[in-house]
Amino acid sequence: MIPIRYNLRSLMVRRATTVMTASVVALVVMLLFILSGFVAGLRATVMGTALTDNWIVLSRGTANEGGSFISREQYEIIKSRPQIKATPDGQALVSPEVITGFNPVPDAPPSSGIFTLLRGVYPIAYQVHRDMRLESGRWPTRGTAEMAVGGNLAARFHNLAVGSDFKFGRRTFKIVGIFSDHDSARESEVLTDLDILTQDIHVANGFEVLHVVLKPGTQADFAKSLTTDSRVKVDTMSEQEFYAKQTEFVDQLRALGLIVALILAIGSVFGAMNTMYSAVARRTSEIGVLRVLGFSRFNVLASFVIESIVLALAGGVLGEILGVLVAYSTGLASQLMNVGEFMFRFRLTADAFGSGLIAAIAIGALGGLLPAWRASRIGLVESLRSV
Amino acid sequence: MFNWIKLVERNMRRNLRRTILTILTIALSTFIYTVLVSVPASMDRVVKDASGTLRVIISNKTAPWEDLPARYCDDINKMSGVAACVAITGWFATWRDVTEPVFGVGAGPEIGDVFPDYALTGQQREARAKEKRTAIVGEILMRKYGWKIGDTVTLRGTDSDHMEMTFIILGQMASKRYPNTFLMRRDYLMAARKAHGLPDEDIAWNIIVRATSADAMGPLAKQIDEHFANSDAETRTMTESDALSSGLSAIGNIRAIVFALCLVVLLTVLLIAANSTVMMVREQISDVAVMRAIGFSRTAVASLLFGECGAIGLIGGILGAGAALWMFSGGITLGAALGGNGALWVTPAQTLNALIAALGVSVVSGVVPIFEAVRIPPALAFRKVV
């Protein structure tokens, strides 16, 4: 094999083109890196809402909480299932809930409006969603116009501090607590008393969704008992499955970003090709000398491909460093962003680093292959004539 | 001038492979840039179009996705400054499978008076009155699903129990402002809901009112909200453009993301074009020396090299921006995000903007290498060659 030192020195000789080609790859990798961090943050926020052993019950055929309706009669039937875990005092761990839209700054101009969710619950919800922790204040008392605000929402909107009043619907609510939930989507929500909320919103004699905690190993029985009971028309699935479905929109966002990155990556493959063709053209005589020294055509081909990969890899590393710098200098890594009703933070993951480097290697390999092939096909006589 | 063009063209053909690769890279980047700059422009277009209407949108004050009683129109019609009022109930559905969404808008016969820009013909109004299953469909939706006038289509709701409804396509919406709209009769939708066991309530998602004049819109909005204050469903009334702005801002900060992406694309083009120019200048340093030696001024030599950069940028830009215009000038749907109003359009203005950007970036990329090349004294340049 031709020593890799030879390739490194060749890259150093043509510094300007090396830096520019590496910078193009760096921009593509930076884009991918930031996209990965963005998607990872959003996905983790949504998936963090799911708990093991927690299942969700929606009316049949409904894909989201908002479009579902479960009557009180159905709730009573479901609540009596033996598969549902109970509190030490014998209360079934079933949380009936209703949701509606919540504008944290109702008086903001329309062009800067943001909507998140207001969830009406009974106190049992604090045991069903057992990862929720009070950071300050207390939970809303049943039958009173009080609210507890998710930590991410409270961090972004200072008008939602404990002790503040908030006008919603036809009444004024008192904010009595701030809660955390491992940075999950629930931290973008507001909780209030279910009966008070249903006086203001349009849910007649029922609920929109039930969250239940099942005894370990009873999930299949629970699902079967609901599908065979003609009195209830509901679908049930684990919270993990439900929230995984909710992240489909994240995949759509990711796909759009990937299309942009892919088109730019093709552009950078062309850029790398240009650079490597130029390198081959300038080093025809060197190729001849290498062949005379006994290196095979394959050695020459491998050497140029490796050179191209090293060049792109340098760009990849630069892109990731740039990505981290951009994330921290612009506040991307610390500020809360929102897509729809979800508030989330950019998240650096091993995947983001890995996929950036893999993309760089692919760009280098694809961009270097044809010029390397050309280099390996240069005849000995032709190359030595140019010495 | 002719000789100048000929020289530029000859220089470009000297290393045809590099020229083609650079043009292709610029074309790809310009394509992406054109589409990206069209996203905020398309959003602005939707809001701007709406600002010219005399409509106000009434939603539930508690939260915009809570319902309103459809009977509110009876009271509103009696108010001064009202030209027409219509209750709208939406229905999310799919056609053959979940990848083919349709957002149905159920409305009564008043819809034609509230939305004169729908341009419903007298014949269409009559046919709607006679046949409850009729639907009038926006241009992009018709094209997307290959529907024709007279087709019978069955849609499946995405709500509980996947209620199915059958429609006869009565016509294509003449206005291009509503490319995704699927307009159906509201009474047909409400009857289907009732037959499906859903609560028998005359509810509307929104109530839309057309004012008699622009001056009447503000007082009318105030009058409506005051009239329904302390009722079971209090109202919040906004102009149509404000309501659309609010919907767009709720999606997230798209403008900032698009701006950042555009910046990355432009930087990529700049670097690729600069890299290509550096290689081009390096190869032509001997020519530069000869031309300088036989009396060409620095400006003349630089103009040749800049001409080559500009030509590459222009061809790449025409290919990329032209492809974007060709693919998206008819618009593609933005889904239900804008309530069926919006689409992504690439217009000649955005194409020109992208073309200028590609040309500018290509020329700018040549500044440093070209000035360095023409500043080398001919004797020194010859030495580099020899």
Image (cartoon, coloured by chain):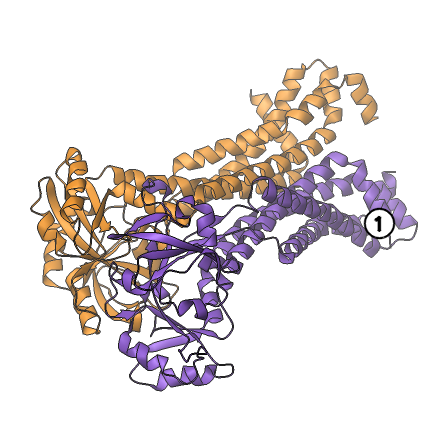
How many marks overall?
A: 1
| Amino acid identity at mark 1 | Ile
Residue at the far left: name it: B78
Give the residue displayed 81% in from the left and 36% down from the top.
A13
Q: In this view, does A202 lie above or below A7?
A: below
- The chain drawn in purple is A
* Mark 1 chain: A
Question: Left or right: B134 with respect to B130?
Answer: right
Question: Is residue B69 in view?
Answer: yes
Question: Is residue A382 in view?
Answer: no
Give the residue displayed 66% in from the left and 20% down from the top.
B301
Label 1 sits on a secondary structure element that is helix
- Where is residue B101? Give x, y as percent: 34, 61
Q: Mark 1 points at which residue?
A: A4
Question: Left or right: A363 with respect to A12?
Answer: left
Q: Tell which of B92 and A178 is nearer to you.
A: A178
**Image quarter for residue B246?**
top left
Q: Tell which of B99 and B121 is nearer to you.
A: B99
- Where is residue A155? Give x, y as percent: 47, 48
Quadrant where the image shows the C terminus of chain B:
top right
Give the residue displayed 81% in from the left and 26% down from the top.
B385
Would you call the spot at circle 1 few (<14 residues within 10 Å), some (14-19), or many (20 or more)? some
Question: Left or right: A300 with respect to A334?
Answer: right
- The chain drawn in orange is B
